[in-house]
Image (cartoon, grey):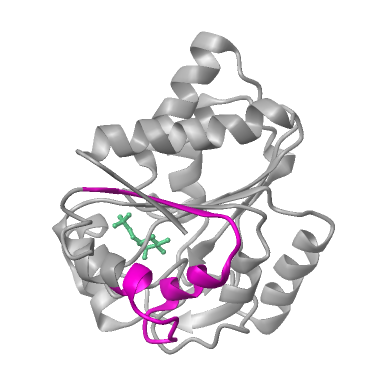
Amino acid sequence: MEVIVLKNYDEVSKKAFEVMKEVVANKKNAVLGLATGSSPIGLYQNMIKDHQENGTSYADITSFNLDEYVGIDRNHEQSYYTFMHENLFKGIDIKEENVHVPYGDTKADCDAYEKAMEDYSVDIQVLGIGANGHIGFNEPGTPFSETTHIVTLTEKTRQDNARFFENDINQVPTHAITMGIATIMKAKKILLVATGKNKADAVAAMVNKAPDVNCPASVLQNHPDVVVIVDEAAAAKL
Ligand SMILES: N[C@@H]1[C@@H](O)[C@H](O)[C@@H](COP(=O)(O)O)O[C@@H]1O
């Protein structure tokens, strides 16, 4: 696991973009695993800027998103489907038919997402990290062997995400559909970004403690190609 510590969110976003650019510049039809949350927004802004200024094309690129809430419509303003269109897809030339965001609340929906991914191999998976160490929506305790599944969100995660729902935890969905840890680990390369002191404990557990289901992100120590890019605040407990 390569850990890069930089000054602030801006520098983290620029460095993350360099890692991403190397993948998309070398493979026209790369497969991107994408994440939501505030952490990757700066990376996505850099991708949009580069597309506009340098013409980097995403026309042959395919994407698979990590997760989605259960119980809100795809077109809800806080759905991850909407998030991805607002924060990345509408600014680049990716084709709608090449975009995949999981959706649904049944085992069949989960299996269908795994099936859709079967024909592809993710070249780079972008990840954020939850304050409790979750990746995607794989909460602490999730077996590392899980594939795409439905989860009950923890109180902590719902609280952390209430900022997107008028600070009202009651509006935050209670369930989500997420790629499992085994799904995430299949990616050829993993790029995790984290900033802010709220992430310091999770980052320290991910990097320094032995892999353990209590910190889902610690599984990344078992992956051969992981780049972790954090700011000084998130690195404070390393
Ligand atoms: N499901 C998402 C995760 O994929 C994300 O990494 C995490 C951190 O979000 P943020 O980057 O906004 O701190 O939030 C949500 O729970």
| Residue at the (54%, 19%) spot, across then down | 51
From the viewer's perspective, is residue 179 above or below residue 35? below
| Residue at the (39%, 57%) spot, across then down | 128
- Whether residue 88 can be seen here: yes
| Left or right: where 230 falls relative to 124 | left
In what quadrant does ligand 1 lie? bottom left
Residue 54, horizontal then vertical, whole percent: 55, 11
Which of the 4 image quadrants contains residue 166? Answer: bottom left
Among all residues in the image, which is located at the extreme right? 119
What's drawn in magenta, residue-wise? 205-231
- Whether residue 58 can be seen here: no
Based on the picture, tell me whether residue 207 belongs to the magenta stretch.
Answer: yes
Residue 6, horizontal then vertical, whole percent: 26, 40
Q: Nearer the viewer, residue 131 or 213?
A: 213
| Left or right: where 51 falls relative to 132 | right
From the viewer's perspective, is residue 107 above or below residue 73? below
Among all residues in the image, which is located at the extreme top? 53
| Residue at the (37%, 86%) spot, across then down | 214
Residue 121, horizontal then vertical, whole percent: 76, 54
Residue 144, horizontal then vertical, whole percent: 56, 83
| Residue at the (67%, 54%) spot, across then down | 188
| Quadrant of the frame with the C terminus | bottom left
Q: Nearer the viewer, residue 171 or 150?
A: 150
Based on the picture, tell me whether residue 78 belongs to the magenta stretch.
Answer: no
Which of the 4 image quadrants contains residue 106? Answer: bottom right
